[in-house]
Image (cartoon, rainbow, N blue to C red):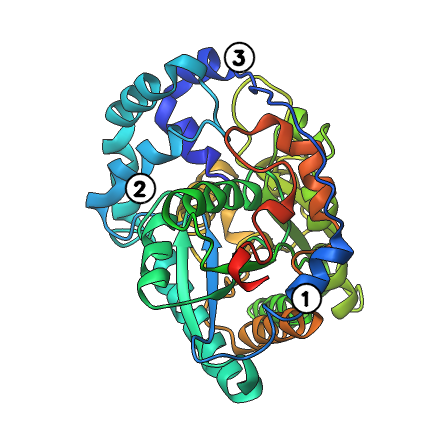
Amino acid sequence: MIPLRLYKNCVGKQWGKRVISSYRMNSTSATTATTSTTASTATASTNASSGSSAGTGVVFMNMGGPSTIAETRDFLFRLFSDGDIIPFGMLQYPLAKFITYRRTPQIELNYAEIGGGSPIRKWSEYQVRKVCEKLDATRPESAPHKPYVAFRYAHPLTEETMQKMLDDGVTRAVAFSQYPQFSFATTGSSFNELYRQTLALDPDRKITWTTIDRWPRNSGLVKAFAQHILQKVKEFKPEDQKDIQLVFLAHSLPMDIVNRGDSYPAEVAATVYSIMEELKFQFPYRLTWQSQVGPKPWLGAKTVKIVGELTDRRDVLGVIIIPVAFTSDHIETLHELDIELPTEVEYPEKIKRAESLNGNEIFIDGLVQLVKDHLDSNQLYSSQLELDYKLGGQYAKNTFDHPSELFGNHNHSEK
């Protein structure tokens, strides 16, 4: 989810109230493309699966984060300049510049406290490299599988990665969203930028794109989280383990986005339920939401409120918090959960955080299976993506009306 914790830190309380209260989404007219998913899938069958010397690009897409403190200012400016997510209208760039200038020093301190930058690039590059290595062995017909990372606000940016892919001669690629649960505010924003950069850098459509746009119940995802939870349970005294509570959390979403029909809340809940099925429901659990900011209604309950209430109780001897919408560590796990949250509750010693997925081999094997199944299926995108854009696409700028405008073969010379 978009780092609205950074949003709060960057704008400050007064600016936060003034800016968020003036938040308006710019609506653009949306039309439904006549191309059916079935027809698009048929086109994909000869383009997304069959092997060629160019191989297959596997592109991990995410928000990203500054790898060094020096990159923080540019990261924040790109974030606040994104009118798809934080629309300021005609004041977009002046406000983005002002907010970035005003609060960069504090955010730089936050990154300094977690080691001098975000580890998200390191982990993303590691994960996609391992996925491609394993795919080369298990699916040689689409090999070589070439690993790429494309971040929305940090290096390597979408345009940087696309140019590298064109230079490498890639002709087919899988846009693999690293948000397991789809939201138009995250995966949708990455796809919008991919489309814009495709028009700018690849107007001849040399690259045929397909996508894995959601995977909330992937077995590798579920089993890796369950494994990390059980590992954390063992850190409590045996006699205390029966009184442990599980608190799952994900970045919250403004209710005006939820009320448009965004699929994120349901898909996060699906992830949580699947993990609990894997754990055979042996622990009480709740799903909570972090990083709410400003006076507008947000999806709740708040993580800090629920964790605080539980740790205050004498009959609760331990709380394990599990960030289920993140596939690796970054500022929201390392700073917001590990540094800030303990200062906001009275008994922080009761709290343990389940490790992030990072290099977990079960998780990586799950990603490999996702890509393999996707290539085997010859699908361009999930059956849900068209509806996502019918409900959310009308609020974005300069993007497609129908997913088939981005995904599938658009190189007319090959049709």
How many neighbours does mark 3 have within 10 angstroms: few (below 14), some (14-19), or many (20 or more)?
few
Residue at image coords 69%, 47%: 385
From the image, tell me which residue sits under label 2: 110
Q: CA distance from mark 1 to mark 2?
A: 32 Å
Q: Quadrant of residue 300?
A: top right
- Which residue corresponds to mark 1? 218
- Residue sitting at x 47%, y 47%: 194
In the image, is residue 142 above or below residue 58? below
Tag in front: 1 or 2: 1
Q: Residues within 10 Å of mark 2 (few under 14, many from 20)?
A: many
Q: CA distance from mark 1 to mark 3?
A: 38 Å
Give how far across and how far down residue 192 sits, in percent: 51, 40
At x 72%, y 47%, the residue is 35
Task: Please give the name of the residue rendered at 49% of the width and 44% of the height, measured from the top-left corner.
Answer: 195
Helix, strand or loop for disc 2:
helix
Element type where label 3 sits in the image:
helix
Q: Amino acid at mark 2?
A: Asn
| Residue 352 x/y as whole percent | 53, 57
Mark toward the viewer: 3 or 2: 3
The location of residue 71, given as percent across then percent down, is 24, 44
Residue that label 3 marks = 21
* CA neighbours of label 1 inside 10 A, class few (<14), some (14 to 19), many (20+): some
Which of 17 and 248 lies nearest the eye of the viewer?
17
Asked if the residues shown at circle 1 and circle 3 are in contact, with their CB atoms under 8 angstroms apart, the answer is no
Q: Amino acid at mark 3?
A: Ser
Upstream in the sequence, badge 1 or badge 2?
2
